[in-house]
Amino acid sequence: MDKVYLYKGTGYGESEMDALAEQIFAPYGGAAALTEGKTRVLVKPNLVTKKGIDTGATTHPAMLRAICKVLLGAGKEVWVAESHGGTYGDSAVRSQFDACGVTAALKDLPVKLCTEADSAFIDVPEGKKSKRFEVIKPVTQVDAIINLCKIKTHALTMFSGAAKNTFGTVPGLRKFELHACFPDYGDFTAMLNDLHLALPVVLNIADGILGMEGNGPTAGVPRSFGFVAVSRNAFLCDRVCLDLLGLDYATVPQTLDAIGRGLCPEAVGAECTDLSAEEYDSFRVKGVALPDSHPTGKISLVQRLLSLGGGRFVKRLKPRPVVDKKKCAACGKCAEYCPVGTIDMKKGRPRIVRDKCITCFCCQELCPFKAIYIKKSRILGI
């Protein structure tokens, strides 16, 4: 049975990261044993946006460097690849690596930064929602993937961890096409699980030394969760993280789909880890702030009444993205990245056409000025 290995951490100093990286591979007999028979190993970080390392939004370059050093020491050919949420092009990829500190962190190591924006297709005949994916080409050219993610709350999927991180293998704007193809939250997250299962991921490393709470994955607040979770099984890793953060797995569609497929258990605890019950409880984090899109409490009487007639009234009152005109710089990125073209630029300012919005919150996630927030209906709180 797969286990989740938990490690406490307080910072990203070089010596601390080097020691942690060795610990991460130790339960598997070391990096060489974990990747036995595999020559080319790709480390897939989370570089969703050009944010500073103190925001908790992206993989810390010091941790990425330490993981790469251990793999190099095991005699592996190491690649690093990622596609952020914007336009996928050579210059954009290089710029993302530079802005997130990756280029500088790895400049003295023989690591290949995959900056050529090529893509390829993979077939997934056993996929539940999708039978084929377009992915960044490097993931089709390696023998194994180390999935290095951040632990964050998420406005759309409620939680972003190991299984969600592999969505970054879909090139650029193709991500938004998938949002448009799967506007239902359950269908979208089931598709994410299809994608993860199709990739040669051999280890998942979920970094919560500094994570994010609230309106993640980019517009939230940095929060020190103080631990790193590691497992071969991304879904079990995420389920344990949810438990330690005190988050209700029933509100996380991706985890519910994984449980339904038998990819992870519904109930978790110390028995899923290498720790005693007392040690496990010492990793718990209290009072994690949820995204504004999170459904709070039980369905109210008003919600039940409004659900009559096919729920079209409730749809009008769901949490939705709204432009903060005081913060908006009229850059047009929200309109460019909207998967269903529901944002118009009127007199240089974005206008969200409410009836067409699928509430994927891509606009909020990718706004460089945090000028889009999530508005809740006061009526549904009654």
Image: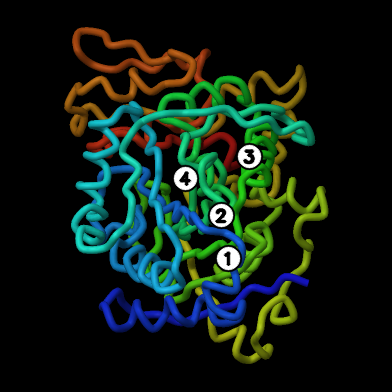
Q: Which of the 4 image quadrants contains residue 248? A: bottom right
Q: Could you tell me the amino acid type at mark 2?
A: Ala
Comes first in the chain, label 3 or label 4: 3
Number of other residues with Cα within 10 Å of mark 1, as a class: few under 14, some 14 to 19, many 20 or more: many
Q: Residue 317: image x %, image y %? A: 56, 27
Q: Mark 4 and mark 2: span between their CA atoms?
A: 37 Å
Q: Residues within 10 Å of mark 2 (few under 14, many from 20)?
A: many
Residue at left offset 49%, top offset 47%: 154
The answer to the question of whether label 3 and label 4 lie on touching residues, with beta carbons closer than 8 A, is: no
Q: Are marks 2 and 1 in contact (CB under 8 Å)?
A: yes
Can residue 78 be seen in the rendering of this structure? yes
Q: SS for tag 2?
A: strand
Identify the residue under disc 1.
35
Q: Secondary structure at mark 1?
A: loop
At mark 4, the secondary structure is loop
Camera-nearest label, 1 or 4: 1
Q: Can you tell which mark lies on residue 292? A: 4
How packed mark 3 is, by other alpha carbons closer than 10 Å (few <14, some 14-19, many 20 or more), is many
* Residue type, mark 3 in image: Leu
Q: Residue at x 50, y 74 (%)?
A: 285
- Which residue was labeled with disc 3? 195
The CA span between labels 3 and 1 is 21 Å
**Quadrant of the image for the C terminus?**
top right
**Residue at 40% in and 38% down:** 83
Tell me the kind of residue under disc 1. Answer: Thr
Query: Considering depth in this image, is 356 or 211 the residue closer to the camera?
Result: 211
The N terminus, quarter of image: bottom right
Q: Is residue 83 left or right of residue 252?
A: left
Question: Which mark is drawn over residue 144?
Answer: 2
Point out the tag, 2 or 1, that comes first from the N-terminus. 1
Residue 269 x/y as whole percent: 71, 76
